[in-house]
Structures are given as C-alpha cells and as structure tokens.
Image (cartoon, rainbow, N blue to C red):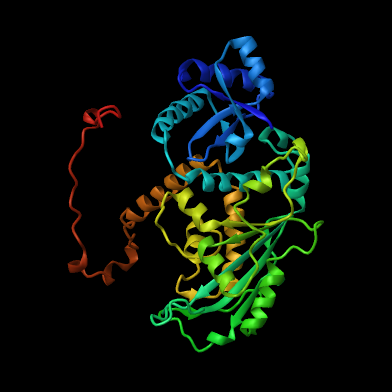
Amino acid sequence: MASFYALANSYPHETAPTVFNELKVMSGNRPVELIQGIKHDGSFELLITRDEEEYFWRRKKIRVRRWNDEDFQSLSPIQFASAEDLKKKMIKLGKDAKKHKDSQSLDGVYKGQYECGRLYRMIALDNIKDYARFGITQAVRSQLLAARIKSFTYTRWSRRNPNNPRAIEVLDMGISEADTNSLSPVLNATVRFKNTQNSGLKQAGFREADTFGTQHPFDRDTITERLNDFFSISSGEAPSVIILVHNEEGTRQVLKDFNVDTRHIVSGTKKLFYPERTRYQGREGTARPRIYLLDLQKIYQILYRTPNDSASVKEIANRTRVTSPCSPEEWNAGNDAKYMIDIWKRFTYGLSINEEYEAINREEQHTLQQAALPAPLQTVDDDDDDDIDPNSIQAVVPGPTYDYDDAPSDDEE
C-alpha cells in the first residue's frame, strides 16, 4: 500500500509559491508536476510523494494530509506552468471539497477511468519510468504492457417490438482491436456480424453504411459462438483485455440475450491498474487476467459534462473530431467498433480531465463566435462596374460610436 500526501488547500497563497518554486528547481526547470488523486465522489486532491512530503516538512513546514492509494479511483499527473496556476487550482479544489462533502456521487468512477486511460498511454506508448509515482507496481506495469485493447458495438432495431419488449432485435454487431504500439484500430481486425435472423428489419430514417473492415452474415448460433470466443480468456497466462463499449448496461443485456458468459467480465479498469492486494499477493500483487469493460459513453458524459446525453458512437466521434464527419443517420456496428478505438485514443492524449474540459469549452466557444461573425464583404473589380445593378447595392448602416475609455473593467462586469 503506497502513501500519498495532499497539499492543504486552506493556505494556497503561502503554499502554492513555495511548492511550485521548490519543485521547479528539483525538476531541473521542467514543468512542475503533481499527482492528481480522484476520489469516489469525484472530488480531487493534489498529492505529493512521501519523499517530497519529508522534504517540504523538514524544510518548509508545509501542512499535508496522508492518504493511501486505495482512497482514490486513479492517480495521474497534472502539470502547472506557474505558481499562480497552482494557487488557483488549490483555491478551486478547496471550494469543490465543500460541495462534495457527504456526496453520494459516482462521478469519480468515470473520471478515474478517463485518467487511467491517460496513464495507460504514458506507460505503454511514452514509456515513462516513474510509473511507481502513480501507485503502479512493476508487476501491474507488465500486465498493462501485455494487455489487449478491443472494442464491441451493436445496433438495435430503431422500431422496438411493443408486443415483445424482450425480443432480440439486434441487427448487427461490430468488433475491432487496437495496435497497442499506436492505439490505432487494426482494419483487418474490424469485423461486422450481420444478424440474418433480423435481416428483414429496416432502420427507419437510417441508411446502412459500407464496412471499413470485413463483414459476415451469421445466424444467431454462429454469433453466439463468435461472441463467446471474443469475450473469453484462453488460459491463466493470457493477457488481460480491455474492451471498449458504448453503454455498458445495454452491452451486458445484449451479451445475456446471446448467452455469452459474463462472469469473468469486470466493470471499469480500476482493478487492472490498482488490484486489490491480499496478504498472499503483497505489494507486487497483480490482477488475475480478466476482461475489463470500459464504457466510453459514460466517460464522454463526464468529460463533456452532459450527464443525460445519449449521444451515439458516431455523434461522439464527430464531436471529438477523431474522424472525418460521419453521418449519425448511418448504421454499421463494424464502423462503430473502429470509431470506439479512435475515441479512446483521443481521450488518452487529453489533458487532466478538468483542464481538458476547459480546453474543449474554449475551442467550441471560439468556433461558435467565428460562425456568428458576418461574412466578409465581396470586393468588386473596377473593370466589372458595368455589370453591377445599382439597385442591388445595400447601404451600410453605421454602428453606434463607442468610447473605450468608458468600457467596464473586468471587476465591474
């Protein structure tokens, strides 16, 4: 069990400059990095390691509070460009802590899943050496490097059967796998299973799209066989598997409908990154190889702060800009499986979750402002004056004058 120490948010004006300046020197003038711990209720703590805590207490008498890695859903890096940025963050966290007091929110679960994705990318692709700083043991690192990344999607019939609400109305399913050297989808691993049992059902208002990978028409029994293969681990030595899904609850219902064994499937990836340690495992305990479902719809809702948004895979792909715009009116679960890997890769390269939201919000606001600007006036070539109808020229109405000396200050707004 690793220990971490939270900076006290009650004295940010004194603590932030001291911590920032000391860590700036200790890091060789590189960006100052702290550890961001996300708790179950979604609140955050800014953490330092035991060695850093001993240094700051001995040299600066800075107050901290001790936590264990088990107190958090995730531990991940967060960087600060200035002491002022750190102070603002500490003030905000102090206010947020009061809001989350006695909260029963589960936001931290999915915020943690987002941060674990960032940590996976840093370990698997960036090959960071200080993974232990974030509570990751060497044994867990080995499991993460060996893990396979897959995705699973499905399309339900848009017109549900009112006479039989439990009818299996899945039109197709899609599976794909990522190249773990790049987190990009492997196209020949992107497969679509068309359910021949429901081949006569049509999607009102939707059109069927061509498949990026391969496509197979299968009956129910064959689909069940293929799904059981996809959602299985062959032996105790096999690597763990992270499977990206859209709506875990719906996914589990579909798997149940097709008689897929889900007893070894775990919700989320926390137990892969931070396995529960027993006295037999000790500090180097690792999770038994399992399949971990990662609900990207939930992560999207938390990241974009749209808790009731039932955005489809294609709508999420469009908003996150992971692919050229695709029509939400198209349906093809094979393509959705590819998009899911693209979406997760995009998430893993994001900033820490609150900073990523702020960056997204700024960018989208800028786009809206640009779209609202009037179109530029058309310039007219003097040689073409004879072709212009003078009655079609609109007069320009002068706008009101504005004295910038009378403009309100930021404090007055």
Question: Taking 270 as reference, is 51 above or below it?
Answer: above
The quarter holding residue 358 reads: top left
Q: Residue furthest front?
A: 279
At horizontal 69% and vertical 64% (from top left) the residue drawn is 177
Residue 127 placement (x, y as % from top left): 75, 43
Question: Taking 265 as reference, is 19 above or below it?
Answer: above
Q: Is residue 81 left or right of residue 149?
A: left
Q: Quadrant of the C terminus?
A: top left
Q: Quadrant of the N terminus?
A: top right
The quarter holding residue 391 reads: bottom left
At horizontal 64% and vertical 10% (from top left) the residue drawn is 58
Q: Is residue 92 left or right of residue 199?
A: left
- 300 or 250, which is in the foreground? 250
At horizontal 63% and vertical 50% (from top left) the residue drawn is 269
Question: Taking 247 as reference, is 258 above or below it?
Answer: below
Q: Can residue 121 be spotted in the picture?
A: no
Q: Can residue 346 be spotted in the picture?
A: yes
Q: How many marks?
A: 0
Q: Residue furthest right?
A: 237
Residue 221 placement (x, y as % from top left): 65, 82
Q: Is residue 68 left or right of residue 373?
A: right
The quarter holding residue 179 reads: bottom right
Residue 97 placement (x, y as % from top left): 44, 31
Q: Is residue 177 left or right of residue 47?
A: right
Residue 56 placement (x, y as % from top left): 62, 15
